[in-house]
């Protein structure tokens, strides 16, 4: 008898992705005036839930992806990619 493996739903993965994304963004620069079109997209790709934080454009191809968070549906492991400039470290002015 084969035991069926339970996969996490998007609803179960969203808080995992949200917390990991917030934590990752602490080290990055946000231009608040550009955030009025901030949008969250989500979906599945294989055994992963994908959560993208992006700035919507007039057309889908004009969207600017800010973060991509992957949550493993089987283990709950999470990884975050951030596509924003990092905050300068103390004592190191921006280039």
Image: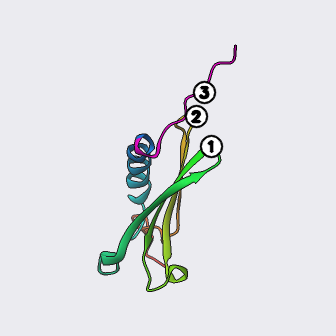
Quick one: SS at disc 2?
loop
Cβ atoms at labels 3 and 2 below 8 Å apart: yes
Q: How is the protein colored in the picture?
A: rainbow
Query: Which residue is labeled 3 in the image?
Result: 5
Most extreme residue toward the front, as rendered? Answer: 1
Disc 1 to disc 3, how far (Cα)?
11 Å
The residue that disc 1 covers is: 47
Q: Pointer 2: what residue? A: 74
Q: Earlier in the sequence, mark 1 or mark 3?
A: 3
Q: Residue at x 38, y 47 (%)?
A: 19
Is residue 9 positioned above or below 28 on the image?
above
Residue 43 belongs to magenta span = no
Residue 36, by quadrant, is bottom left
Identify the residue at image location x=38%, y=44%.
15
Of the pair 2 and 43, the residue shown nearer to us: 2
Report the mark closest to the observer, 3 or 2: 3
Q: Secondary structure at mark 3?
A: loop
Q: Residue furthest right?
A: 1
Q: Secondary structure at mark 1?
A: loop
Image x and y of residue 85, in percent: 48, 72
Instruction: Sort mark 2 into few (<14), some (14-19) or many (20+) by Cα contacts within 10 Å.
Output: few
Q: Is residue 79 at all visible to an observer of this figure? A: yes
Quadrant including the N terminus: top right
Please say whether residue 6 is one of the residues in the magenta stretch.
yes
Q: Earlier in the sequence, mark 1 or mark 2?
A: 1
| Most distant residue in the top direction | 1
Residues drawn in magenta? 1-11
Seen at 52% across and 68% down, the residue is 83
Mark 1–mark 2 distance (CA, rounded to whole Å): 7 Å
Main SS, magenta region, reads loop
Return the x and y of residue 65 as percentages of the image width and height.
Answer: 50, 71
């Amino acid at each position: 008898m084969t035991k069926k493996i339970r996969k996490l739903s998007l609803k179960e993965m969203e808080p995992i992705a949200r917390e990991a994304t917030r934590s990752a963004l602490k080290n990055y620069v946000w231009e608040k005036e550009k955030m009025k079109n901030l949008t969250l997209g989500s979906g599945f790709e294989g055994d992963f839930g994908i959560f993208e934080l992006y700035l919507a454009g007039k057309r889908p191809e004009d969207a600017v992806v800010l973060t991509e968070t992957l949550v493993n549906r089987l283990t709950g492991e999470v990884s975050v990619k951030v596509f924003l400039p990092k905050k300068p470290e103390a004592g190191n002015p921006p280039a």
